[in-house]
Image: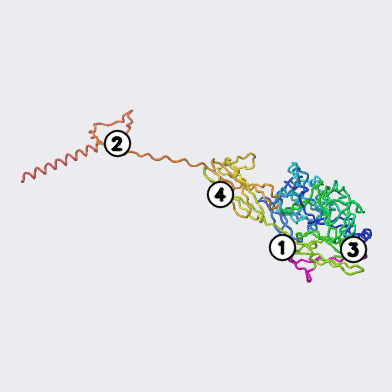
Amino acid sequence: MPRRLAGTTVLSAGLVLAVLLAWAVVALPRAAADEVPPSEPFAAVQYGTNGCLEVGARDTQPKPYAAPDDYDPADHAYPDFGYDPESLGFTATSGTNACRYNFRDANGTVIGSGYCVQWAKGQRSGTGYDPEPAGGIRNAGYVQRILENYWPATNEPAVPSTNVTVANRQRSGAVAMAIHYFTDGIVMPPDYQAPEMYAVVQKIVTDVLAAGPAAAPADPTPTIEGPDGGDTGTLIGPYTIGANATGPVTVTVENADAFTDAASTQPFTSGDTLAPGGRLWLRSTTPGSARIAATGPVTAAIGTLMEGDPTYKVQSMALAGALPLQGKSARTVDIAAGDPPRLASEVSTTTLTTGQSVTDTFAVSGLTGDATLDITLYGPLPPVDDSCAAVDWTGTPPVEHRYESVALTGPGRTTTPERQIDEPGCYSFGATLDPAVGDDVSHAPGDPLETFLAQPRHVPPVLSVTTRASANTAEAGDSVRDRVTVTGLPDGRTLTAAVTLYGPLAPAADGTCEGIDWSAPGLPVADRLPPLVIRANSTYSTDPVTLQEPGCYSFDAEVTHDALTGGEVPVGHGLGVPAETVLVTAAPSPSPSPTATPTPTPTPATPTPPPAPGPHPSLPDTGDDRPLGALAVAAACFLGLGVLLVAAQRRWTNSRGRGNGSA
């Protein structure tokens, strides 16, 4: 874990004369810092956000881009709006909400806020955080400059909105994206939906590059100043504990007896407290390593690095303002039996991401004259099972860098300049101490305290959430579902979709749902469905919803996730989108069943009376208004038929009479 090594002889790299003077004054080496990971009880708890800016959080929004590993943001101006990502070698990465985050105390009271300094490392409200000495943050000086000069430390940057709430979101999000440019090489989308906000982020970066990096914040943990080691049976010290603390400091001592006076007449019980600046002396009869640990209140300055509970994969943060917090620190004291020079060291971090920097601190004890210290960084070698524990450093490992020789005039310590690591793999420091009198002391690579793993920087795939209703038209009484399709969700992460069906609203004038305003407050709610908890990329369906009333309906899926920073802020998907809209019409009315008509019983025909002579006028008030011509034709037909019948009868009769006479 990154840390800042405290001690009275920490000097600027390259000022060899100052180093020599310091070592001439200090008879013994100063205590080197141990790595103290965050642990319970935590100094603060990260919970909730305090202003966010959407940067590709929605599926319909353009996504940000990641610069390649060899692109140092400190050496490049921020790309202009509309830049060509391909020509710059940038890679599309997942969008999210760029936020400022709240810190709370153990009682749940908001005590401060901070910004993320690691893109795509995950975020989880309720995670405990501890302050840590600065170190390991890429371009940390530029990040410090942003935190000191911009929101909420000042009212900068200027943003488009004058609404207090919206302006806070815009300032917080713009500062967050400017920080991510320096720490992770993340650039706003070239076609960002709000060009005026792109310009705000670009101006922050431009002004900060012109101003240059700021100094690192003070150590937020109780300082422990004193020798790195001594000989068995002798009193080693003094160790000044928590000179920077604002209250009593709890101190534990392991593998040695402790005293509060130089005569060793006042024993100190491990676990008791000391006032700020209290002193201890140690003594042990056996060689080995003793350890001093301190916990106490220290004012953590703006820009202090906050590291989360290592149980969870969460982002590191930097404080946006000074906070009084409980800091934890420790020092290892090397107790040896002999007088020959001893060489001990510890790397600043055991794991880093390519593009970050590393240092190593070497402590020399038992040196009685002049010497030269030569330090070499070896690597990279391929890890074994994602670890450097089983890597073979024998033979001739590759050399990544040889540092300038350091001249020593006695015991002391030196820290290498920061070295940026661009290639993934396993690295290890080695050193040779060449005293003017006596044999060389070698420190071969491969010691776990000297070895670190550089992991490739992970550019997460685009997290995509698309939603679609199972039907876009239906009749009252039908059922519909919402379908949520998720891609780009990393393994081990969880996404939750809370789906609500809004409606009904009256259709548009053309009878469709196009052009309806779904943004009005107080939309009617047809149903709120059980949340979908999603842990794998696939398509998921909600429970069915029966549509009772005609009109326009729309699903809306509010999505949260723990995959990226800002993922806990709900983002709506689908409200009013055609794919999520359903037009419900009334069910058609049922047709009546036909009634059977009975067949009438036939009745005998009524004889037709002979027609009356003369014309047949219309009969007034009887409803018989037929024309007289039609009646006359009918009468003539009946008369003609009668004449034919009479003539036929006569012929038949005559024929029978003639036949009878001849017989």
Tag of residue 386: 1
In terms of sequence position, does the residue under pointer 1 or pointer 4 come before the other?
A: 1
Q: Would you say the residues marked 1 and 2 are in contact, meaning their CB atoms lie under 8 Å apart? A: no
Tag of residue 470: 4
What amino acid is labelled 4 in the image? Ser
**Distance from label 1 to label 2 (Cα)?**
113 Å
Q: Which tag is nearer the camera, tag 1 or tag 4?
A: 1
125 magenta-colored: no
The residue beneath circle 2 is: 630
Say left or right for 159 vs 636. Answer: right
Q: Which tag is nearer the camera, tag 4 or tag 3?
A: 3
10 Å neighbourhood of mark 2: few (<14), some, or many (≥20)? few
Q: Secondary structure at mark 1?
A: loop
Per the rendered image, the range of residues in magenta is: 369-398
Q: Position of residue 421 (x, y in %)?
A: 78, 62
Q: Secondary structure at mark 2?
A: helix
What amino acid is labelled 2 in the image? Ala
Name the residue furthest top: 621
Q: Position of residue 358 (x, y in %)?
A: 80, 60
The residue beneath circle 3 is: 366
10 Å neighbourhood of mark 4: few (<14), some, or many (≥20)? some
Q: Nearer the viewer, residue 363 or 236?
A: 236
In which quarter of the view is residue 254 placed? bottom right
Q: Position of residue 351 (x, y in %)?
A: 76, 59
Q: Nearer the viewer, residue 308 or 213?
A: 308
Number of numbered discs overlaid on the protein picture = 4
Q: Position of residue 417 (x, y in %)?
A: 84, 61
What amino acid is labelled 3 in the image? Gly
